[in-house]
Amino acid sequence: MQQNAVPSDLDTNAAKGAAFPTTTYTYFDLGPGPNGKDAYGYGESPNAQAGAYFDHTISCGKACSAKVYYPLAWSGPSSSPVVLLPQNYVEGWAYGAGGSLIVGTLITNDGGYFGFPHAALWQGSSHTFTDLNPSGSCGSCSPGSNAYDTDGTYIAGYSGSPQHAFLWKLGQLNAPVDLNPAGYSNSEAYVVRGTTQAGWAFSSTTNSYHAVLWHGTAASVVDLTPSTTSSAEATGLGSKSQVGCGTLVGMSVTHALLWHGTAASMKDLQPSGFTDSCARAAHGNVQVGYGHFTANSLHALLWKGSAKTAVDLQQYLPNTFTSSEAYAIDPAGDILGSAYSTTTATWHAVIWHP
Protein backbone atom coordinates (compact mmCIF):
# COMPACT_ATOMS: atom_id res chain seq x y z
CA MET A 1 0.00 0.00 0.00
CA GLN A 2 1.10 3.53 -0.74
CA GLN A 3 -0.66 6.48 0.77
CA ASN A 4 -0.64 10.25 1.06
CA ALA A 5 -3.45 11.85 3.00
CA VAL A 6 -1.85 15.29 3.27
CA PRO A 7 -2.32 17.85 0.48
CA SER A 8 1.01 18.45 -1.20
CA ASP A 9 2.15 21.00 -3.76
CA LEU A 10 -1.34 20.94 -5.32
CA ASP A 11 -2.52 23.42 -2.68
CA THR A 12 -2.52 26.02 -5.44
CA ASN A 13 -5.19 24.04 -7.28
CA ALA A 14 -7.64 24.59 -4.45
CA ALA A 15 -6.88 28.31 -4.51
CA LYS A 16 -7.85 28.31 -8.16
CA GLY A 17 -11.26 26.84 -7.53
CA ALA A 18 -11.12 23.19 -6.37
CA ALA A 19 -12.06 23.39 -2.69
CA PHE A 20 -10.61 21.10 -0.03
CA PRO A 21 -12.96 18.33 1.12
CA THR A 22 -14.12 17.62 4.64
CA THR A 23 -13.12 14.00 3.94
CA THR A 24 -9.49 13.14 3.29
CA TYR A 25 -8.42 10.24 1.11
CA THR A 26 -5.76 7.55 1.24
CA TYR A 27 -4.67 6.19 -2.09
CA PHE A 28 -3.93 2.58 -2.98
CA ASP A 29 -1.80 1.86 -6.02
CA LEU A 30 -3.05 -1.23 -7.89
CA GLY A 31 -0.09 -0.81 -10.22
CA PRO A 32 0.38 -1.13 -13.95
CA GLY A 33 -0.66 -4.21 -15.92
CA PRO A 34 0.96 -7.57 -15.24
CA ASN A 35 3.47 -6.79 -18.01
CA GLY A 36 4.39 -3.43 -16.47
CA LYS A 37 2.48 -1.38 -19.06
CA ASP A 38 -0.50 1.00 -18.77
CA ALA A 39 -3.46 -0.15 -16.65
CA TYR A 40 -6.81 1.57 -16.15
CA GLY A 41 -9.58 1.12 -13.60
CA TYR A 42 -13.12 1.54 -14.95
CA GLY A 43 -15.72 -0.14 -12.72
CA GLU A 44 -16.03 -1.48 -9.19
CA SER A 45 -18.18 -3.18 -6.61
CA PRO A 46 -17.36 -3.72 -2.92
CA ASN A 47 -15.67 -7.00 -3.92
CA ALA A 48 -14.03 -6.33 -7.26
CA GLN A 49 -12.48 -3.77 -9.58
CA ALA A 50 -12.59 -4.00 -13.36
CA GLY A 51 -10.36 -2.47 -16.00
CA ALA A 52 -7.91 -3.12 -18.79
CA TYR A 53 -4.22 -2.93 -19.61
CA PHE A 54 -2.10 -2.34 -22.69
CA ASP A 55 -0.62 -5.74 -23.57
CA HIS A 56 1.19 -5.28 -26.88
CA THR A 57 1.37 -3.40 -30.16
CA ILE A 58 0.53 -4.83 -33.56
CA SER A 59 1.40 -3.60 -37.03
CA CYS A 60 -1.50 -2.45 -39.20
CA GLY A 61 0.44 -1.59 -42.33
CA LYS A 62 3.14 0.80 -43.44
CA ALA A 63 3.89 3.38 -40.73
CA CYS A 64 0.86 2.15 -38.77
CA SER A 65 0.55 0.40 -35.42
CA ALA A 66 -2.23 -0.22 -32.91
CA LYS A 67 -2.28 -0.95 -29.19
CA VAL A 68 -3.99 -4.14 -28.02
CA TYR A 69 -5.69 -4.21 -24.59
CA TYR A 70 -6.70 -7.11 -22.33
CA PRO A 71 -9.40 -7.05 -19.62
CA LEU A 72 -8.33 -7.11 -15.97
CA ALA A 73 -9.91 -7.73 -12.57
CA TRP A 74 -8.68 -6.97 -9.07
CA SER A 75 -10.16 -7.96 -5.70
CA GLY A 76 -9.06 -5.12 -3.46
CA PRO A 77 -6.03 -2.95 -2.70
CA SER A 78 -3.56 -5.75 -1.97
CA SER A 79 -4.64 -8.04 -4.80
CA SER A 80 -2.80 -8.96 -7.96
CA PRO A 81 -4.48 -8.31 -11.32
CA VAL A 82 -6.19 -11.24 -13.07
CA VAL A 83 -6.27 -11.28 -16.87
CA LEU A 84 -9.81 -12.08 -18.09
CA LEU A 85 -9.15 -12.77 -21.79
CA PRO A 86 -10.72 -16.14 -22.78
CA GLN A 87 -9.47 -18.34 -25.59
CA ASN A 88 -10.50 -17.36 -29.14
CA TYR A 89 -10.70 -13.64 -28.29
CA VAL A 90 -7.92 -11.26 -29.20
CA GLU A 91 -8.64 -8.09 -27.23
CA GLY A 92 -10.93 -6.82 -24.51
CA TRP A 93 -11.85 -4.41 -21.71
CA ALA A 94 -13.67 -4.94 -18.41
CA TYR A 95 -15.85 -1.87 -17.84
CA GLY A 96 -18.22 -2.57 -14.98
CA ALA A 97 -18.56 -4.55 -11.75
CA GLY A 98 -21.56 -5.23 -9.51
CA GLY A 99 -22.25 -7.98 -6.98
CA SER A 100 -20.32 -11.01 -8.20
CA LEU A 101 -20.41 -9.90 -11.85
CA ILE A 102 -17.91 -8.16 -14.12
CA VAL A 103 -18.90 -7.06 -17.62
CA GLY A 104 -17.13 -5.63 -20.62
CA THR A 105 -16.29 -6.16 -24.25
CA LEU A 106 -14.21 -8.74 -26.11
CA ILE A 107 -13.06 -8.74 -29.72
CA THR A 108 -13.45 -12.08 -31.48
CA ASN A 109 -10.79 -13.90 -33.45
CA ASP A 110 -12.28 -14.04 -36.92
CA GLY A 111 -10.08 -16.59 -38.68
CA GLY A 112 -6.84 -15.06 -37.41
CA TYR A 113 -8.05 -11.47 -37.77
CA PHE A 114 -9.67 -9.07 -35.34
CA GLY A 115 -13.40 -9.74 -35.59
CA PHE A 116 -16.38 -8.12 -33.88
CA PRO A 117 -17.04 -6.69 -30.40
CA HIS A 118 -19.03 -8.99 -28.14
CA ALA A 119 -20.60 -8.09 -24.80
CA ALA A 120 -18.89 -10.19 -22.13
CA LEU A 121 -19.84 -11.42 -18.66
CA TRP A 122 -17.60 -12.92 -15.97
CA GLN A 123 -19.19 -14.41 -12.82
CA GLY A 124 -17.84 -15.18 -9.36
CA SER A 125 -14.34 -15.45 -7.98
CA SER A 126 -13.46 -17.96 -10.72
CA HIS A 127 -14.56 -15.44 -13.40
CA THR A 128 -16.73 -17.90 -15.30
CA PHE A 129 -17.16 -16.43 -18.78
CA THR A 130 -20.31 -15.97 -20.89
CA ASP A 131 -20.48 -14.35 -24.33
CA LEU A 132 -23.60 -12.14 -24.27
CA ASN A 133 -23.64 -11.27 -27.98
CA PRO A 134 -27.26 -11.79 -29.14
CA SER A 135 -26.11 -13.12 -32.51
CA GLY A 136 -23.92 -15.80 -30.95
CA SER A 137 -20.29 -16.25 -29.97
CA CYS A 138 -18.74 -17.11 -33.34
CA GLY A 139 -15.78 -15.06 -34.56
CA SER A 140 -17.65 -13.75 -37.58
CA CYS A 141 -20.92 -12.96 -35.79
CA SER A 142 -21.99 -9.50 -36.84
CA PRO A 143 -22.82 -6.79 -35.90
CA GLY A 144 -21.63 -7.27 -32.34
CA SER A 145 -22.38 -5.84 -28.91
CA ASN A 146 -20.89 -4.20 -25.83
CA ALA A 147 -21.54 -4.36 -22.07
CA TYR A 148 -20.66 -1.32 -19.96
CA ASP A 149 -22.14 -1.76 -16.50
CA THR A 150 -23.88 -4.13 -14.10
CA ASP A 151 -25.53 -3.87 -10.70
CA GLY A 152 -25.16 -7.61 -10.08
CA THR A 153 -28.50 -8.51 -11.67
CA TYR A 154 -28.93 -6.29 -14.73
CA ILE A 155 -26.37 -5.49 -17.44
CA ALA A 156 -26.40 -2.36 -19.62
CA GLY A 157 -24.81 -1.95 -23.04
CA TYR A 158 -25.73 -2.06 -26.72
CA SER A 159 -26.12 -4.38 -29.68
CA GLY A 160 -27.06 -4.23 -33.35
CA SER A 161 -26.40 -2.10 -36.40
CA PRO A 162 -27.35 0.64 -36.03
CA GLN A 163 -26.53 0.14 -32.38
CA HIS A 164 -29.38 0.04 -29.89
CA ALA A 165 -29.16 0.32 -26.12
CA PHE A 166 -29.67 -3.14 -24.60
CA LEU A 167 -30.57 -4.42 -21.15
CA TRP A 168 -29.76 -7.98 -20.06
CA LYS A 169 -30.98 -9.67 -16.88
CA LEU A 170 -29.16 -12.50 -15.12
CA GLY A 171 -31.18 -15.69 -15.59
CA GLN A 172 -32.67 -14.32 -18.82
CA LEU A 173 -29.49 -13.56 -20.76
CA ASN A 174 -30.92 -14.89 -24.03
CA ALA A 175 -33.76 -12.37 -24.00
CA PRO A 176 -32.26 -8.86 -23.70
CA VAL A 177 -34.52 -5.81 -23.91
CA ASP A 178 -34.01 -3.34 -26.76
CA LEU A 179 -34.14 0.14 -25.18
CA ASN A 180 -33.79 2.21 -28.35
CA PRO A 181 -36.58 4.80 -28.12
CA ALA A 182 -38.90 5.79 -30.94
CA GLY A 183 -37.68 8.85 -32.81
CA TYR A 184 -33.99 8.12 -32.14
CA SER A 185 -31.80 6.34 -34.67
CA ASN A 186 -29.33 4.68 -32.29
CA SER A 187 -28.42 4.57 -28.63
CA GLU A 188 -26.23 3.10 -25.88
CA ALA A 189 -26.95 2.33 -22.21
CA TYR A 190 -23.90 3.13 -20.09
CA VAL A 191 -25.13 2.44 -16.56
CA VAL A 192 -27.80 0.45 -14.73
CA ARG A 193 -29.10 0.47 -11.14
CA GLY A 194 -32.07 -1.86 -10.70
CA THR A 195 -34.95 -0.72 -12.89
CA THR A 196 -33.16 2.46 -14.00
CA GLN A 197 -30.72 2.86 -16.89
CA ALA A 198 -28.99 5.87 -18.44
CA GLY A 199 -26.94 6.61 -21.52
CA TRP A 200 -27.47 8.44 -24.81
CA ALA A 201 -29.70 8.35 -27.86
CA PHE A 202 -29.02 10.06 -31.18
CA SER A 203 -31.75 12.37 -32.44
CA SER A 204 -32.02 12.78 -36.20
CA THR A 205 -34.24 15.80 -35.57
CA THR A 206 -31.53 17.77 -33.78
CA ASN A 207 -28.62 15.81 -35.32
CA SER A 208 -27.09 15.41 -31.87
CA TYR A 209 -26.57 13.04 -28.96
CA HIS A 210 -29.04 13.36 -26.10
CA ALA A 211 -28.50 12.15 -22.54
CA VAL A 212 -31.43 9.86 -21.71
CA LEU A 213 -32.92 7.93 -18.82
CA TRP A 214 -34.88 4.67 -19.02
CA HIS A 215 -36.91 2.56 -16.60
CA GLY A 216 -36.60 -0.83 -18.25
CA THR A 217 -38.33 -0.22 -21.58
CA ALA A 218 -37.82 1.85 -24.71
CA ALA A 219 -41.16 3.59 -24.13
CA SER A 220 -40.08 4.79 -20.68
CA VAL A 221 -37.34 7.06 -22.06
CA VAL A 222 -36.81 10.53 -20.57
CA ASP A 223 -34.75 13.00 -22.59
CA LEU A 224 -32.41 14.80 -20.15
CA THR A 225 -30.96 17.25 -22.67
CA PRO A 226 -32.32 20.82 -22.53
CA SER A 227 -32.24 23.24 -25.46
CA THR A 228 -29.27 25.02 -23.87
CA THR A 229 -27.12 21.94 -24.51
CA SER A 230 -26.02 20.92 -28.00
CA SER A 231 -25.08 17.33 -27.04
CA ALA A 232 -24.83 15.24 -23.87
CA GLU A 233 -24.55 11.72 -22.50
CA ALA A 234 -25.36 10.21 -19.10
CA THR A 235 -22.74 7.86 -17.68
CA GLY A 236 -23.58 7.43 -13.99
CA LEU A 237 -26.54 6.99 -11.63
CA GLY A 238 -26.91 8.11 -8.03
CA SER A 239 -29.87 7.17 -5.85
CA LYS A 240 -31.98 10.03 -7.28
CA SER A 241 -29.64 11.60 -9.79
CA GLN A 242 -27.86 11.13 -13.09
CA VAL A 243 -24.41 12.37 -14.12
CA GLY A 244 -22.48 12.68 -17.34
CA CYS A 245 -21.11 15.39 -19.57
CA GLY A 246 -22.10 17.50 -22.52
CA THR A 247 -21.41 20.57 -24.61
CA LEU A 248 -23.40 23.70 -23.90
CA VAL A 249 -24.68 25.78 -26.81
CA GLY A 250 -21.96 28.15 -27.98
CA MET A 251 -19.15 26.15 -26.40
CA SER A 252 -16.68 23.65 -27.85
CA VAL A 253 -15.60 21.75 -24.71
CA THR A 254 -17.50 19.34 -22.49
CA HIS A 255 -18.69 20.14 -18.98
CA ALA A 256 -19.61 17.68 -16.24
CA LEU A 257 -23.39 17.62 -15.79
CA LEU A 258 -25.84 16.59 -13.07
CA TRP A 259 -29.56 15.85 -13.43
CA HIS A 260 -32.41 14.89 -11.11
CA GLY A 261 -34.68 13.11 -13.55
CA THR A 262 -35.56 15.92 -15.96
CA ALA A 263 -33.90 18.12 -18.56
CA ALA A 264 -34.96 21.21 -16.60
CA SER A 265 -33.03 20.01 -13.54
CA MET A 266 -29.62 19.97 -15.30
CA LYS A 267 -26.72 21.56 -13.40
CA ASP A 268 -23.31 22.47 -14.79
CA LEU A 269 -20.57 21.00 -12.57
CA GLN A 270 -17.62 22.57 -14.41
CA PRO A 271 -15.10 23.62 -11.70
CA SER A 272 -13.41 26.99 -11.71
CA GLY A 273 -9.86 26.77 -13.04
CA PHE A 274 -10.50 23.74 -15.27
CA THR A 275 -10.77 23.85 -19.06
CA ASP A 276 -13.24 20.94 -19.34
CA SER A 277 -14.72 18.15 -17.23
CA CYS A 278 -16.85 15.01 -17.24
CA ALA A 279 -18.69 13.22 -14.42
CA ARG A 280 -18.51 9.44 -14.82
CA ALA A 281 -20.18 7.93 -11.76
CA ALA A 282 -22.23 8.74 -8.68
CA HIS A 283 -23.27 7.27 -5.35
CA GLY A 284 -25.66 9.00 -3.00
CA ASN A 285 -24.91 12.72 -3.18
CA VAL A 286 -21.33 12.25 -4.44
CA GLN A 287 -20.22 12.45 -8.07
CA VAL A 288 -16.78 11.59 -9.49
CA GLY A 289 -15.02 12.14 -12.80
CA TYR A 290 -12.18 14.21 -14.18
CA GLY A 291 -11.20 17.42 -15.93
CA HIS A 292 -8.22 19.10 -17.53
CA PHE A 293 -6.50 21.51 -15.15
CA THR A 294 -4.08 22.40 -17.91
CA ALA A 295 -3.87 21.17 -21.50
CA ASN A 296 -1.66 18.23 -20.51
CA SER A 297 -2.77 17.59 -16.94
CA LEU A 298 -5.94 15.57 -16.30
CA HIS A 299 -7.13 15.54 -12.67
CA ALA A 300 -9.61 13.22 -10.97
CA LEU A 301 -12.51 15.18 -9.47
CA LEU A 302 -15.24 14.76 -6.87
CA TRP A 303 -18.38 16.84 -6.44
CA LYS A 304 -21.25 17.01 -3.96
CA GLY A 305 -23.98 18.39 -6.15
CA SER A 306 -22.55 21.67 -7.45
CA ALA A 307 -19.55 23.17 -9.22
CA LYS A 308 -18.43 25.01 -6.10
CA THR A 309 -18.10 21.74 -4.16
CA ALA A 310 -15.49 20.34 -6.60
CA VAL A 311 -12.56 18.53 -4.99
CA ASP A 312 -9.32 17.87 -6.86
CA LEU A 313 -8.50 14.25 -5.93
CA GLN A 314 -5.00 14.50 -7.33
CA GLN A 315 -3.92 16.27 -4.12
CA TYR A 316 -4.02 12.85 -2.41
CA LEU A 317 -1.49 11.33 -4.82
CA PRO A 318 2.28 11.75 -4.50
CA ASN A 319 4.11 14.17 -6.77
CA THR A 320 5.27 11.29 -8.97
CA PHE A 321 1.70 11.02 -10.33
CA THR A 322 1.08 13.88 -12.76
CA SER A 323 -2.38 13.07 -14.17
CA SER A 324 -5.39 11.14 -12.89
CA GLU A 325 -9.02 10.27 -13.64
CA ALA A 326 -11.90 8.78 -11.62
CA TYR A 327 -14.39 6.39 -13.22
CA ALA A 328 -16.30 4.66 -10.42
CA ILE A 329 -17.42 4.97 -6.81
CA ASP A 330 -18.80 2.14 -4.66
CA PRO A 331 -21.24 2.24 -1.72
CA ALA A 332 -18.35 2.55 0.77
CA GLY A 333 -17.14 5.69 -1.00
CA ASP A 334 -14.05 4.06 -2.52
CA ILE A 335 -13.22 5.70 -5.85
CA LEU A 336 -11.58 3.78 -8.70
CA GLY A 337 -9.62 5.31 -11.52
CA SER A 338 -6.14 5.68 -12.94
CA ALA A 339 -3.07 7.88 -12.49
CA TYR A 340 0.03 8.43 -14.60
CA SER A 341 3.30 7.60 -12.82
CA THR A 342 6.47 9.37 -13.89
CA THR A 343 8.40 6.72 -11.94
CA THR A 344 7.29 3.88 -14.24
CA ALA A 345 6.21 6.08 -17.20
CA THR A 346 2.89 4.19 -17.24
CA TRP A 347 -0.70 4.59 -16.11
CA HIS A 348 -1.60 2.74 -12.88
CA ALA A 349 -5.03 1.70 -11.67
CA VAL A 350 -5.61 3.41 -8.30
CA ILE A 351 -8.20 3.56 -5.51
CA TRP A 352 -8.97 6.63 -3.39
CA HIS A 353 -10.22 5.42 0.02
CA PRO A 354 -12.07 7.86 2.31
Image (tube, rainbow, N blue to C red):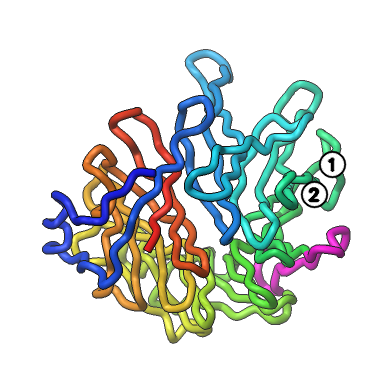
Instruction: Indicate the amino acid at tag 1.
Output: Ser
* Quadrant assignment, res 79: top right
Instruction: Identify the disc placed on residue 203.
Output: none
Asked whether, in this view, residue 262 is left or right of residue 22, the answer is right
User: Is 182 located above or below residue 119 in the figure?
Assistant: below
What residue is rendered at 39% in x and 64% in y? Answer: 247
Q: Residue at x 76, y 21 (%)?
A: 112
Q: How much space separates mark 2 and mark 1, taking CA atoms?
A: 6 Å
Residue 252 picture quarter: bottom left
Magenta highlight range: 169-187
* Residue 23 vs residue 249, the one in the foreground: 23
Dominant secondary structure, magenta: loop
User: Which residue in the protein does label 1 denote?
Assistant: 137
* Closer to the camera in the image, 164 or 23: 23
Q: Position of residue 56 (x, y in %)?
A: 55, 23
Residue drawn at x 71%, y 74% is 182
Task: Give the farthest residue toward the top.
Answer: 62
Q: Position of residue 286 (x, y in %)?
A: 41, 73
Q: Residue at x 51, y 19 (%)?
A: 64
Q: Residues within 10 Å of mark 1 (few under 14, many from 20)?
A: some
* Residue 186 is one of the magenta-drawn residues: yes
Closer to us: 130 or 133: 130
Q: Are marks 2 and 1 in contact (CB under 8 Å)?
A: yes
Residue 342 visible here: yes
Check the image and report above or below for 105 versus 25.
above
Placement of the C terminus among the 4 image quadrants: bottom left
Q: Amino acid at mark 2?
A: Asn
Residues packed near mark 2 inside 10 Å, few (<14), some (14 to 19) or many (20 plus): many
Residue 114 spot, x, y in % from top left = 70, 29
Q: Which residue is mark 2?
A: 133
